[in-house]
Amino acid sequence: MKIINFSCVKSLFLRKVLEIVFLILLISCAQEKTNKTEINSLVMPVSSTIEIEDDDNNDSIILKAAHIVPTENQYEALKDEFIAFIHFGPNTFTRMEWGNGMEDPKIFNLQNLDTDQWCKAMAAAQMKKVIITVKHHDGFVLWQSRYTKHGIMSTPFKDGKGDILRELSESCKKYDLKLGVYLSPADLYQIENKEGLYGNLSKYSERTIPRPVEGRPFKDKTTFTFNVDDYNEYFLNQLFELLTEYGPIHEVWFDGAHPKRKGGQTYNYLAWKELINTLAPEAVIFGKQDIRWCGNEAGGTRDTEFNVIPYKENPNQMNSFADITGEDIASRKKLYEANYLHYQPAETNTSIREGWFYRDDDKQKVRSADDVFDIYERSVGGNSTFLLNIPPNRDGKFSPEDVNVLEEVGKRINETYGKNLFEGAEGSTNVLDGDLASFEVLDSVNNEIVITSKEPVTINRIVLQEAIATHGERVEKHALDVWINNDWKEIAKATNIGYKRILRFPEVSSNKFRIRVLESRFNPTISNITAHYYKPKPPQLVINRDLNGLVNIHPKQHDFGWKPHGENASENINSGVQIRYTIDGTEPTSDSDIYKEPFLLASGEVRAKAEANDEKGSLASQLFGIVKKDWKIVAEDSFSGKQKSEYAIDENPNTFWQSGIKGNPHYIEIDLSKEYGIKGFIYTPQKEHNDGMIEKGVIKSSRDGKSWQLIDEFEFGNLINDPTARTHYFKQPINAQFIRIESKVIAGGNKTAAIAEIDFLVE
């Protein structure tokens, strides 16, 4: 680089200053040019596993983390995005979640099977792969195994000649679905059977896999020699059958659950792995080095789900893997403690029904389409794979309600993500061309991508993807800005991106959008940016109030009690929906107040409606009595277990007071803290079970809590079938500070009284 001669400047000091300033300017210009055209995207070889050396510091560890990439199989598994689980077996007929291994195979009394119906419904849901429990913990097998009689071959189904895995494999080919198998290492039949192989203390020795069985030769002539015991040999023989006789297998799923152990049985996973890698070269292995469990069975997701995982040992040589369940599993702090960094994506698994196996349509709730779609966006859009279980019923089909949910979810996915609203937009070609192999490289200076559409577009979803197959996961924090009123406005912010991040936000219209990378582990490589619109639907609303009198209005959560994930699905997917409300008893209109935050209400009726896309939802209303902040229970006849009388006045309808069996009448007495003019009351029964619903009773009042006067008698019908809140108005309003509720008749002839909530209406 040649520096201009400043010899005409007489002052030596000034001449040196000018030369230094000019040199800095030249370097700055050169650096700016490099930033724009020659940003380094790789400074070391990439790998799915990298060892941390003794001389690595924190910076070099993070640089290594930025060069961890998925294997080809892992990347293909991530691209499946939404996959299915099938739990089917004796538990379907016994209604148990875990069998005991000693069930008579004939209990699996399957008369019909329609795997085409399964696959049609899964394909309609936009699923790409299905994993079936060919052997659960009970040891019962769903295929014609050579190595056991505890399975489908010993059932009435097709006179013992049926093969559920075979039929599913054929249906998968018809509907273009990949196939995976769940083979439980735990095996209660092999434990409980006196001739069972699990934990029988057999010696390890050289064994040939597969073990020949007379009359049933294998077409695949591959053989293996492993040093294993009896149970590991049995397990390897079954793996050989599954991986050679049922078409391509794309995932092998190992459950870590163990209902029972015996004889110190251990597993030779490294032998299993060698067999799987040889016979099913396209398969990923769940529960081991390829795919990890998300840490819960509820459909819960982490806000930040990095797939670069720290390990103390080399995961490619490990025999067993512990569950990773913490909230922070792969932050910089966690990586600093590692000896190995390893790419290991998560599967977010849960069930569409309350339980993994089918029990009954009338006793087992089904997730709503809102809930499943929300989990889809949180999991697939949170750098993981969504694994949803759909258990077939005893007629060998998916139940109609399950199918309806799957079809509705698939429709929403297609309508929302089937069209890219950035199509034809201007900006970086590498992120707009739909090619995941092309990418835009950013750094700390050039850290943004601006996209301009030809016409304004209305969106409420943005999908971002990094070039993880070639460059790994790097973004740690990013934001979305929209050009509104001649200025940038930030409308969404999140942490990592990885394979895919879905940003959800209230709808916005513009023709100019900007993605900013705020923090990263190395120069980010963004491969894909698309824009979408999910059409919000006015949700059903719930109105409640806390002990202090603060009223909250929010979308109703679907009644699904199994392993709650704590998310309000309707609220999540319908961001931007407006809620209009009134407190004077009139019906809300487009001119009514917009609900923005909880508000105080001493008493009265709140009515509310949600609005979206000029469509109004159903009316929700709630009548509130006296604020309960200063109420006290002064007496009760009894209580059962933990169901104390305080729960009758805690403003939580999910808790309740329940009396003991003895006592006549059952009663509670309440101090309202001061005297009120009262015109009636609201009784909310508990919904946990049928016992305790007060069908008939009396209300008494007192001004001193000692001398009681009868106010009125009340009667409520059909409580067991319809356990909703009931209102009773007195013949004449009364003034009182103390109230006593007594039971006279309990619905169904039961012996205890229960109250979820009691409220008193003021004049």
Image (cartoon, rainbow, N blue to C red):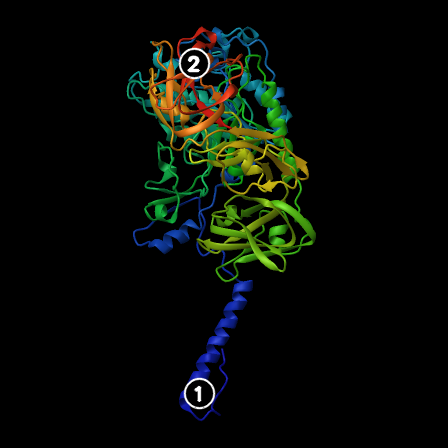
Residues 162 and 598: in front is 598
Q: Is residue 758 above or below residue 595?
A: above
Lateral position of residue 267 relative to residue 6, left or right: left
Of residues 502 and 306, the one drawn nearer to the viewer in this rendering: 502
Q: Residue 121's x, y, as percent?
A: 62, 24
Up the image or down, 518 lies above or below 192; here it is below
- Identify the residue shown where x is 63% and y is 60%: 486
Q: Is residue 55 left or right of residue 84?
A: left
User: As drawn, is 56 to the left or to the right of 182?
Assistant: left
Question: Hey, what amino acid is under mark 1?
Answer: Arg
Total count of labels = 2
Q: Earlier in the sequence, mark 2 or mark 1?
A: 1
Residue placed under numbered mark 2 in the picture? 692
Please indicate whether residue 119 sits to the left or right of residue 747 in the image. Answer: right
Residue that protrudes farthest toward the right in the picture: 455
Residue 36 falls in image quadrant: bottom right
- The secondary structure type at the circle numbered 1 is helix
Q: Residue 50 placed where, x, y %?
A: 39, 47
Label disc, if present, on residue 751 of the rendered structure:
none
Q: Can residue 744 be seen by looking at this rendering?
A: yes
Marks 2 and 1 sit apart, C-alpha to C-alpha, by 96 Å
- Residue 715, percent across and down? 50, 12
**At label 2, which amino acid type do we have?**
Gly
- Secondary structure under tag 2 reads loop
Q: Is residue 98 visible?
A: no
Picture residue at 56% right of the left edge, 47% below the top: 464
Q: Where is 38 relative to 210, above or below?
A: below
Q: Residue at x 68, y 39 (%)?
A: 614
Q: Which residue is mark 1?
A: 15
Q: Nearer the viewer, mark 2 or mark 1?
A: 2
How dense is the environment of label 1, judged by Cα within 10 Å: few (below 14), some, or many (20 and up)? Answer: some
